[in-house]
Amino acid sequence: MAINTKMFSETSGRMRLFSIVFAVVAFILLADNYARNLSNEEAFFYALMVCMIISIILAVVSLLGLLENNNLRMLDNIFHTVAAVAILITAILFLISVFEYRKYHTNSVFAKRLASGILGFIYGLMCANMGWLLFRG
């Protein structure tokens, strides 16, 4: 089993890598302030965690060259579409709650939460774009 290094020379491979980086950074920023237990925050936290883990698994599978199977490609496409919807909806709701509760947080906590929401939203957009690229290709 050889490693598929050409994955990172393709647009979808680079986007997959960047989306994982955005997800990890958003997750770290959010995990730091998770103690407030807001329902929108919980939804965003768990959606981000699950989608990030599955993205990493699919990136490793793709790197190992195992995504040549049509069933796995379809699974990859479906995952990125569902992840995009879940992340975008929860990120929007999370950002709304960040601005609603802004007066209760210090500026540094607000900045971390805002950055987490924005990076999570970007991750959702990249998942949507990945789903579109995989659907077309």
Image: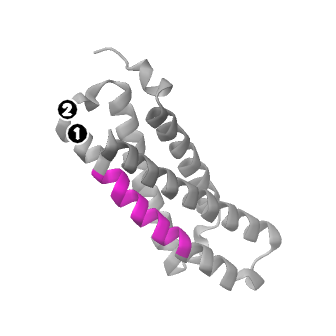
* Quadrant in which residue 119 is drawn: bottom right
Is 120 within the magenta?
no
Say the numbered circle drawn on residue 82.
Answer: none
* Quadrant in which residue 3 is drawn: top left
Query: What is the CA distance from the residue labelled 2 to the residue labelled 1?
Result: 5 Å
Tag 2 residue: 69
Q: Which residues are magenta?
A: 78-92
Q: Where is residue 121 shown, x and y percent of the image?
A: 56, 61
Say the numbered circle drawn on residue 72.
Answer: 1
Mark 1 element type: helix
Q: Where is residue 7 shown, x and y percent of the image?
A: 42, 26
Q: Are marks 2 and 1 in contact (CB under 8 Å)?
A: yes
Residue lying at the far right of the rendered structure: 107
- Residue type at tag 1: Leu
Q: Where is residue 122 shown, x and y percent of the image?
A: 57, 56
Mark 2 element type: loop
Which quarter shows the C terminus? Answer: top left
Please give left or right for residue 10 compared with residue 75 in the image.
Answer: right
Q: Nearer the viewer, residue 81 or 105?
A: 81
Dominant secondary structure of the residues highlighted in magenta in the image: helix
101 vs 42: above or below:
below
Residue lying at the far top of the rendered structure: 2
110 vs 129: above or below:
below
Which quarter shows the N terminus? Answer: top left
**Which residue corresponds to the image point at 51% horizontal and 44% vertical from the top-left?**
20
Q: Nearer the viewer, residue 33 or 82?
A: 82
Count the numbered circles shown: 2
Is 85 within the magenta?
yes
Q: Residues within 10 Å of mark 2 (few under 14, many from 20)?
A: few
- Residue type at tag 2: Asn
